[in-house]
Image: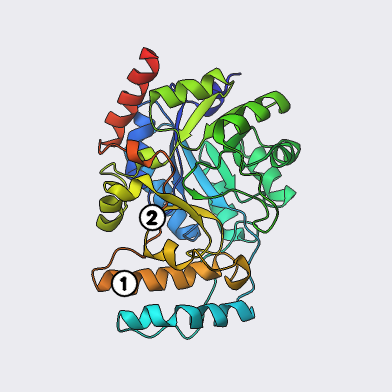
Amino acid sequence: MTLLATLGIDLPIIQAPMAGVSSPAMAAAVSNAGALGSIGVGATDAAGARAMMAAFRERCARPLNVNVFCHRPADVESPRAAAWLEHLRPHFERFGVPAPPGLKEPYRSFVTDDAMLAALLADKPRIVSFHFGLPPAERVQALREAGIVLLASATSVAEGRALVNAGVHAVVAQGYEAGGHRGVFDPDADDDCLGTMALTRLLVRELDVPVIAAGGIMDGAGIAAALRLGAGAAQLGTAFIACPESVADAGFRAALASDAANHTVMTRAISGRPARCLRNRFTVLGANVSPQQIPAYPVAYDAGKALHAAAKAAHEAGYGAHWAGQGAPLARSLPAAELVAALAAELREV
């Protein structure tokens, strides 16, 4: 069976599951257009995930990809947390608010979230995808036994092999160009920073499951290039941020439409994990900070969200998590269905 048949889609296009940006309306528009729409539920709880899946089903009867985060649960009591808050204190004071008294883990990892597993088994989306590694084997098995297709991100051949051995049906080759969080299993391990095209070709050669190329792909020419290297489909995230169905705020949209789109950087400062972001005040803040100073994900994100909220209240958008890939200057402000149609037409032309 081909990857498209496995996923139940007509086009080799997947809208990336961007937590905090992709919406049920966007996913539905994409899926109705023949591609694969996705939602990211890593930043919500089981009730929130079920509400999002229901909102998708109200708009669309086609396949949906639901993405979960599989990071290691963080140590909220780490000394780094207090030191990091102290480091950020002057920035909070700049906006006339005190730094939070402490930090918490704002959302749970799927690794330990029994309620999220129950929600997925009850709602049975066509596809579930993993980011930041894998959940325990029994969770993978439960999802497989429910008939759910499993995808997972890999940033190296070793990670790709681990995913196949665990039982995923296809591997997302996340290149270093990609926006948002690196899918590395261990954020403290050495990262070879493989680009999308090289990683895709390596995984196609090494793995016996389909490969999905992700990172820096913004148009039909990029999709065609990935397919020529053997990918079964391409996953695009940044390409969909400017769509009206996205829940990106006005500051994010303005930054994406500005010169900032030409300058993306990898930073840990916002969330605690490496993530590619449009260069802004927060990325500059983190430029000279060592990884050892920053609390683990997602505890650091608790501070990042609080600082962004304080800045946004003062009409300063430069502390947002403006995740975007290196292809950001190619973003288009089209409705999601029109963007899918344009991508498909460009692919046919190529």
Is 163 on the left-hand or right-hand side of 102? right
Position of 344 relative to 71 (above/below): above
Circle 2: element type: loop
Circle 1: element type: helix
According to the image, what is the colour scheme of the structure?
rainbow
Residue 100 sits in which quadrant? bottom left
**In x, y percent, where is residue 270?**
47, 64
In the image, what residue occupies the spot 28% across and 36% down?
332
**In x, y percent, where is residue 317?**
29, 63
The answer to whether one can see residue 77 in this image is no
Residue under label 2: 322
Quadrant, the C terminus? top left
Extreme front residue here?
288
Residue under label 1: 311
Cα separation, mark 1 vs mark 2, equals 14 Å
Residue type highlighted by circle 2: His
